[in-house]
Amino acid sequence: MIDLLLKRLDSVRKIGRDRWLARCCVHEDNCPSLSIRQASDGTILLHCFAGCGASDIVEAVGMKLSDLFPKPFDQHIKSKRYQPPYRQILRTVAHDAKVVSLFINRTDDDLSDEDLRIVNTALANIQRMGSRWS
């Protein structure tokens, strides 16, 4: 796709690896103000220093915004599924369980206000994690 885009632009010159400058086709451009870059995943990035939008640029050259991406956007999302940080969750729950176990045999009279706050926070964390993953 990058070759097709570059062929449809004027005054294109290569300025680096996978980087070009061209005259923007959306506004009157005497000096090249359109930066084009191809990212490592094949995505084409456009930036007009005069402020023209990427959708206006691709439309002006007879392309679609989706042409700037190597695969459909929903495939990008699927390939980067969210993985919960299980180890961190287990560490947090283990820590909170340890905190609760330290205070479990003490009565409310033995606990300071700060101790009660710590225990209640730990219990709330454990409950929140339990409800989130059940």
Image: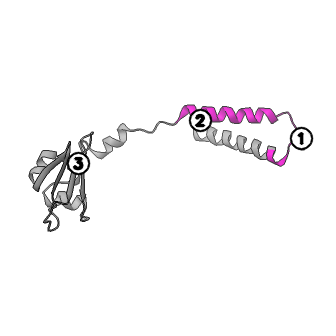
Say if mark 3 contacts mark 2, CB within 8 Å: no
CA gap, disc 1 and disc 2: 30 Å
Q: Residue 1, can we see it?
A: no
What number is the disc on residue 110? 1
The residue positioned 77% from the left and 32% from the top of the image is: 101
What number is the disc on residue 89? 2
* Image coords of residue 105 (percent x, y): 85, 33
Which quarter shows the C terminus? top right
Check disc 1 and report its element: helix, strand or loop.
helix
Q: Nearer the viewer, residue 36 or 120?
A: 36
> Could you tell me the amino acid type at mark 1?
Asp
Which mark lies nearer to you, 3 or 2? 3
What number is the disc on residue 99? none
Other residues around mark 1 within 10 Å, as few (<14) / some (14–19) / many (≥20): few
- Quick check: 66 left or right of 117? left
Magenta part of the chain: 85-114
Label 3, on which residue?
37
Residue 71 among magenta residues: no
Residue 98 among magenta residues: yes
CA gap, disc 3 and disc 2: 39 Å
Most common secondary structure along the magenta stretch: helix
